[in-house]
Image: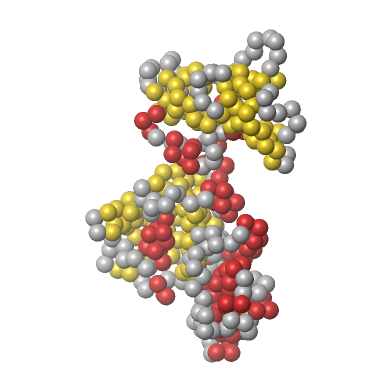
């Protein structure tokens, strides 16, 4: 095994960047191994795309450094040109050349060999991605999914160490997006390319990546697997951004906060105002009986079957606003029914209200 294959694919260390006087990246640290797919997730304007542009060499670095395959490619006052960084780029706009046939679009990205060798390489990539039948066509006759595959083939043509993807599947309909996305990831993993994907869609991030870096205001606020970010959010922002939540307010007292559905640990000083975030699947429903039981009483006001699960909106008797539960579909949870709600502490999170 060579040193290059064991080196990290992409490293950003202490990267800060600003446009005029407006900071867009603040001391960002991120490392992606060869063959790993990492995702930058966050709301619009949080710094995801500037991070990609700095990594690609499209923006001169202002603070920190960028390494690719263990070699430094950027620091303040020094920058390896984008075409020499062994980086592949794919954006929402596939930017295929309309005047070139598909095979020539891909061959354009091949750096080594004569014209015939470049076209052979291009055809191999088109075949791998299942669009070799369109080699002699012009891009405008291809569907969105086919254009996306051609754009990926062109980005892979120079044999990049790193692939940077800026929401490349957002223009595709859902069914096609799932298939093209899966095919794309299979190829990137097979070729052991370090991949950094940008998205604002938490579900897409969970489906695509080995690791997710959640961004806010130019900084990574939490990084980990999809399971870690969903099940163990470290902030109110992470809890609310990374999946749907019910939110109720409370007060910490004696290291806990009492809610109508149960008590949760709240390691804050007495009197601290807190927000309780509860995943829909963290609420369980029980049929109301004549006997008093733990939990809040509520009425079902909406019930929607979603395959094996049911999404239920509830109006509790307690003054806490409406709640949404996701439960196994049994046919029991009909509109107008009175039920009791309990919460699961493993799917509930407490943070100071000021943190929001």
Along the line of sight, which residue is nearer the eye, 257 or 188?
A: 257
Q: On the rendered structure, is 155 left or right of 17?
A: right
Residue at the outermost right position: 331
Q: On the rendered structure, is 179 left or right of 235?
A: right
Relative to 270, residue 132 above or below: below
Instruction: Point out the image quarter for the N terminus.
Output: bottom right
Question: Is residue 182 visible in the rendered structure shown here?
Answer: no
Along the line of sight, which residue is nearer the eye, 297 or 86?
A: 297
Residue at the outermost top position: 291
| Visual colour scheme | secondary structure
| Residue depicted at 43% across the width and 49% down the height | 43
Q: On the rendered structure, is 179 left or right of 23?
A: right
| Residue depicted at 53% across the width and 48% down the height | 202
| Residue depicted at 53% across the width and 18% down the height | 318
Horizontal and vertical percent for residue 171? 55, 62
| Residue depicted at 58% across the width and 25% down the height | 315
Horizontal and vertical percent for residue 264? 51, 22
Question: Is residue 249 visible in the rendered structure shown here?
Answer: yes
Q: On the rendered structure, is 83 left or right of 227?
A: left
Horizontal and vertical percent for residue 64? 32, 57
Relative to 283, residue 262 above or below: above
Horizontal and vertical percent for residue 65? 34, 60
**Disc count in the image?**
0
Instruction: Point out the image quarter for the C terminus.
Output: top left
């Amino acid at each position: 095994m060579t040193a290059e294959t064991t080196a990290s694919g992409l490293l950003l260390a202490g990267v800060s960047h600003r446009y005029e006087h407006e900071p867009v990246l603040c001391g960002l640290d991120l490392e992606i191994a060869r063959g790993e797919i990492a995702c930058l997730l966050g709301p619009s304007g949080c710094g995801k795309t500037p991070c990609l542009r700095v990594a690609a060499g499209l923006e001169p670095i202002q603070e920190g450094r960028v390494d690719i395959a263990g070699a430094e490619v950027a620091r303040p006052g020094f920058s390896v040109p984008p075409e020499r960084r062994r980086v592949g780029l794919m954006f929402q706009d596939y930017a295929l050349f309309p005047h070139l046939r598909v095979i020539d679009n891909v061959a354009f990205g091949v750096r080594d060999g004569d014209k015939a060798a470049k076209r052979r390489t291009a055809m191999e990539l088109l075949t791998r991605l299942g669009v070799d039948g369109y080699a002699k066509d012009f891009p405008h006759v291809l569907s969105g999914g086919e254009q996306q595959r051609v754009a990926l083939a062109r980005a892979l043509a120079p044999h990049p160490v790193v692939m940077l993807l800026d929401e490349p599947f957002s223009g595709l309909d859902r069914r096609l997006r799932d298939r093209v996305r899966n095919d794309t990831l299979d190829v990137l993993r097979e070729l052991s390319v370090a991949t950094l994907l940008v998205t604002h869609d938490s579900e897409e991030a969970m489906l695509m990546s080995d690791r997710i870096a959640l961004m806010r205001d130019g900084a990574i606020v939490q990084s980990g697997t999809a399971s870690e970010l969903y099940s163990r959010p470290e902030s109110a922002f992470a809890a609310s951004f990374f999946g749907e939540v019910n939110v109720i307010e409370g007060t910490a007292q004696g290291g806990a906060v009492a809610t109508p559905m149960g008590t949760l640990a709240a390691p804050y000083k007495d009197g601290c105002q807190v927000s309780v975030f509860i995943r829909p699947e963290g609420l369980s429903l029980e049929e109301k009986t004549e006997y008093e039981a733990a939990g809040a009483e509520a009425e079902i006001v909406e019930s929607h079957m979603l395959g094996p699960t049911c999404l239920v909106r509830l109006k509790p008797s307690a003054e806490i606003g409406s709640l949404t539960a996701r439960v196994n579909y049994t046919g029991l949870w009909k509109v107008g029914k009175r039920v009791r709600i309990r919460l699961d502490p493993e799917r509930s999170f407490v943070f100071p209200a000021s943190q929001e």
